[in-house]
Image: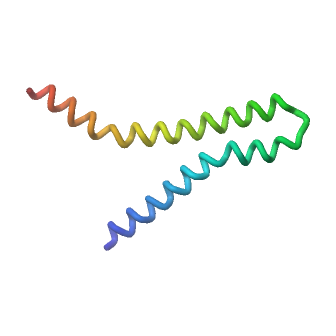
């Protein structure tokens, strides 16, 4: 039962991290759009979009890593 509970907690934490990463550019844009500094807003939104994309890309690579290792080991052995 402990393992299942740990998996559920980790799943919920990842959901919160991914959702906040995805929504961060919108929040930054809404917060900074009231200012007169257009370039600052564009750079801040660009930076948060890059960070959110990096989080999602890292998740994909972490998910694919075990499959790539199995494939490499298979081709090295045969």
- Does 64 sit left or right of 75 as displayed? right
- The residue at the point 27 percent across, 38 percent down is 67
**Residue 19: x and y, percent?**
57, 52
Extreme-right residue of the structure: 36
In the rendered image of this protein, does residue 40 appear above or below residue 13? above
In the rendered image of this protein, does residue 68 appear above or below residue 14? above
In which quadrant of the rendered image does the C terminus lie?
top left
**Residue 77: x and y, percent?**
10, 28
- Does 69 sit left or right of 26 as displayed? left
Where is residue 49, by image quadrant?
top right
Extreme-left residue of the structure: 78
Where is residue 50, by image quadrant?
top right
In the rendered image of this protein, does residue 73 appear above or below residue 31? above
- The residue at the point 31 percent across, 73 percent down is 1
- The residue at the point 60 percent across, 38 percent down is 51
**Picture mark count:** 0
Q: In this figure, which colouring scheme has been used for the structure?
A: rainbow
**Residue 21: x and y, percent?**
60, 46
**Residue 2: x and y, percent?**
34, 71
């Amino acid at each position: 039962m402990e393992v299942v509970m740990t998996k559920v907690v980790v799943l919920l934490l990842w959901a919160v991290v991914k959702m906040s990463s995805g929504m961060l550019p919108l929040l930054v844009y809404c917060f900074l759009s009231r200012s007169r500094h257009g370039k600052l807003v564009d750079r801040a939104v660009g930076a948060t979009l890059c960070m959110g994309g990096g989080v999602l890309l890292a998740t994909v690579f972490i998910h694919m890593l075990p499959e790539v290792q199995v494939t490499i080991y298979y081709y090295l052995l045969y």
